Amino acid sequence: MSDIERVRILSGIIGTSDAMEQVLEMISQVAPVDISVLIVGESGTGKEMVARAIHKISRRSHRPIVTVNCGAIPEGIIESELFGHKKGAFTGATEDRKGYFEEADTGTIFLDEIGETPVGTQVKLLRVLESGEFMRVGEAKTRSVDVRVVTATSKNLFKEAEKGKFRKDLFYRLRTVTIEVPPLRHHLEDLDVLVERFALQFSRKNDIVFRGFTSDALSVMKQYDWPGNVRELRNFVESIIILEKGNRISSNIVLKHLTPLVGEASPNLPVPIDKSTDQVERELILQQLLFLRQDIRDIKSSLIGEEFDRSGEIGFLPSGEVLPQSSMEISKESLPKAVKSSAVGDISVKDLEMELIIRTLKKFNNNRRKAANVLGISERTLYRKINEYGLEKKQKTKE
């Protein structure tokens, strides 16, 4: 059994995509070594599962792991919760009390949302990380613990440190090793197995008849952005099973339950989800290029102060006319109402795509994430188009 497979079995982490394979590999490498680990990722991506996986594979696996949500503890009592307090230290302290660090002695402490801790508390956290020493609130005695610290955050701690909201020395100490958990939209190839796992677990636990999801239903779900990530997906699967008890989940059912969540103009559902992904991508790319050329012409007209004859121009949209809505292939024949066929000439969809991608990448200094956002496609699709058209090689040749 490979190290990655062992991590997968012990942790229960689901996913065979390249992104998740990298996470599993990182866990297998850092877990046996007694160092601090910082886990970063958006809310709902599964950072706590990664922390527990690190503990299960470490030499401390026979000892406890204590999980602390730093964002859920009020600022006034967080030090008492973490380090404990002495009897009489404050009103209500009727007895000596251990803190989470002492509870985790010889084991692992997982500090979730570490970016929410007050700056004053961060000083004491740094001391524990450096020397294993701390003092209970209201006590002058120094205590020691042997504990592994794993932290997680959905914030950009570097930016927080630049703003003075997070100590730089603590940030550099925490990031001995950083594991980035990808958002669900970056590994949608894992959605099928995630849906299956969540559905089976929930239906068995609640003794509900479950007849599965159709392939079309899963395709529709892959076109949604899932801002809440795996947590949102799990909640969605469980709710749809309850509301559609006994039914096989089709694309129409998924659409019915997704629409109230996202609304008609939601940025999380940027494409018409009743079409195939490739078809939508082609239409979006062509649409953006036509609008771009029309905007450029408008700017030229306003600068020169005169109107040009635009009827023969590629991308000219006569007043009141719109792009065609659906076609499996975008060609001259599919654009009679949007662009004059005589103006399109021999320019193909591929040429239009290539030009728009090149211009957009150039505009954003080859920042592919920003380019993908502007183009209205996923980063994965943009990478595929760059490789398909050999744009990277062309760019290097020019350089």
Image (spheres, rainbow, N blue to C red):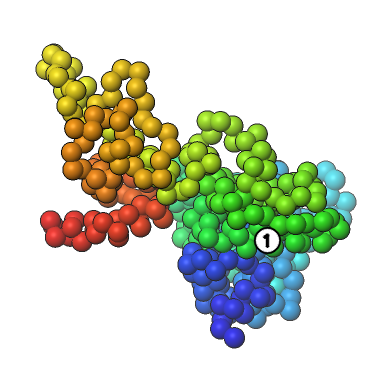
Spot occupied by residue 273 in the image (x, y as percentages of width and height): 53, 42
User: Which image quarter holds the C terminus?
Assistant: bottom left
Find numbered disc 1 in the image and state the secondary structure of the residue it sits on.
helix
Could you tell whether 228 is left or right of 73 in the image? left
Marker count (numbered): 1
Residue 282 occupies quadrant: top left
Q: Position of residue 374 (x, y in %)?
A: 36, 40
Quarter of the image for residue 308 reads top left
Q: Quadrant of the N terminus?
A: bottom right
Residue shown at 38%/39% (left/top)?
Answer: 284
Q: Is residue 58 visible?
A: no
Query: What residue appears at the point 42 percent right and 49 percent down from the top-left corner?
Result: 278
Image position of 101 (left or right of 186):
right
Residue at the image position 30 percent from the left and 42 percent from the top: 331
Q: Is residue 365 above or below residue 211?
A: above
283 to 306, vertically: above or below? below
Query: Which amino acid is tagged 1?
Result: Glu
Q: State whether residue 267 appears in this view.
A: yes
Residue indicated by mark 1: 196
Corner quadrant of residue 27: bottom right
> In the image shown, does 13 or 330 lie closer to the viewer?
330
Q: Residue 18: x percent and y percent?
A: 47, 67
Question: Which residue occupies 24% across, 29% down?
Answer: 340
Residue 359 % position (x, y) = 23, 43
